[in-house]
Image (cartoon, helix red, strand yellow):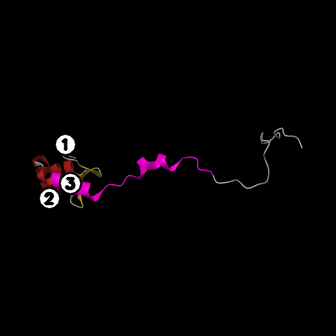
Amino acid sequence: MSEKPDALSRRSDHGDSPMEPQVMIPPEKFVGFMADVKTSFLDEVREAQREDEAIKVLWESVSNKEQLPPSVRKEFRRYDIKEGILEYDGKIYIPDDRDL
């Protein structure tokens, strides 16, 4: 048999042997995707939200949405409080705090 690649595979080593598993992307390339939000950070956000004067007013309005007039209530429909943290469109509302 010739050492030239065959017409279909263009590889001289083409055969019936099973393919070995290959790692296309090494694990160290996934480091940024493995980040976990630490509970302590969420605790810091909770505390900072409670101390921020502007957020206190917003928090009060969001907490009592049902008691607001309909025209005002619709302004707060995108806000929510989950697990003691104020969110806007499902994203954590980060107060203006340089430590965060």
The residue mark sitting in front, 1 or 2, is 1
**Residue at x 19%, y 46% (from the top left corner):** 95
The residue mark sitting in front, 3 or 2, is 3
Of the pair 94 and 75, the residue shown nearer to us = 94
The mark tally for this picture is 3
In the image, is residue 21 part of the stretch drawn in magenta?
A: no
Quarter occupied by residue 17? bottom right
Mark 1 / mark 2, whichever is N-terminal: 2
Residue type marked 2: Asn
Q: Which residues are magenta?
A: 22-48
Give the numbered dot on residue 64: 2
Give the numbered dot on residue 98: 1
Of the pair 42 and 76, the residue shown nearer to us = 42
Mark 3 / mark 2, whichever is N-terminal: 3
Residue type marked 3: Glu
What residue is shown with label 3?
Answer: 44
